[in-house]
Image (spheres, grey):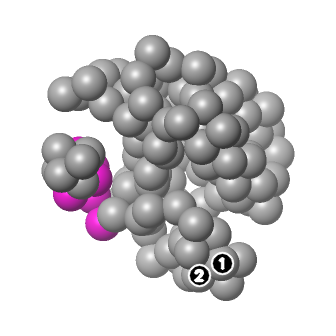
Amino acid sequence: MGNFNRMIINRVEILKCDGEITLKNGDTFKTYIYELIEANTNQLLLDLSDVPYLNSAAIGYIADAVLKARSKNKELIVAGLQPNIQEIFEITKLGTFVKLFNDVGEALLSFKEV
């Protein structure tokens, strides 16, 4: 089952997810990702590098969170997608409206470019 931890690196609020995101922990994931949007920074990062699986509800929560972040003039980006999850992002076209990065380091550097 997934674990969720928040941390701050270089003024970027990060939600680090570890393990599968399924029906059993989907509501917890939803709570954490929506709390991330309320952080006192406009730079938000969802780290999925240790997530081997996520269900369709989690995809919906991510899409909704990206839109909520934008409505608050914040940017939520995603890093560390496993190949199977990357494929889901491509099929659902989620990758067309959220920035995706190979790893957290690359994602953090993208915020410095702003």
| Count of all numbered marks drawn on residues in the image | 2
Query: Mark on residue 82?
Result: none
Q: CA distance from mark 2 to mark 1?
A: 5 Å
User: What residue range appears in magenta?
Assistant: 102-108
Q: Quadrant of residue 53?
A: bottom right
Residue 58 visible somewhere in the drawing? no
Residue drawn at point x = 49 percent, y = 45 percent: 76
Q: Image quarter for residue 12?
A: top left
Based on the picture, tell me whether residue 107 belongs to the magenta stretch: yes
- The answer to whether the residue labelled 2 contacts the one labelled 1, judged by CB atoms less than 8 Å apart, is yes
Q: Is residue 92 left or right of residue 66?
A: right
In terms of secondary structure, what is the magenta stretch mainly?
Answer: helix
x and y, in percent, of residue 70 in the image: 60, 43
**Label annotation for residue 93:** 1
Identity, as a three-letter code, of the amino acid under mark 1: Lys
In the picture, the quarter occupied by the N terminus is top right
**At 72% from the left edge and 34% from the top edge, which residue is drawn?**
30
Please say if 49 is above or below 88.
Answer: above
Residue at 54% x, 36% y is: 73
Q: Would you name the residue on which mark 2 appears? A: 90
Work out whether 96 lies above or below 47.
Answer: below
**Mark 1 crowd level (few <14, some 14–19, many ≥20, 10 Å Cα):** few
Please, what secondary structure does the residue beneath circle 2 have? Answer: helix
Residue 3 part of the magenta segment = no
User: What's the residue type where badge 2 is placed?
Assistant: Glu
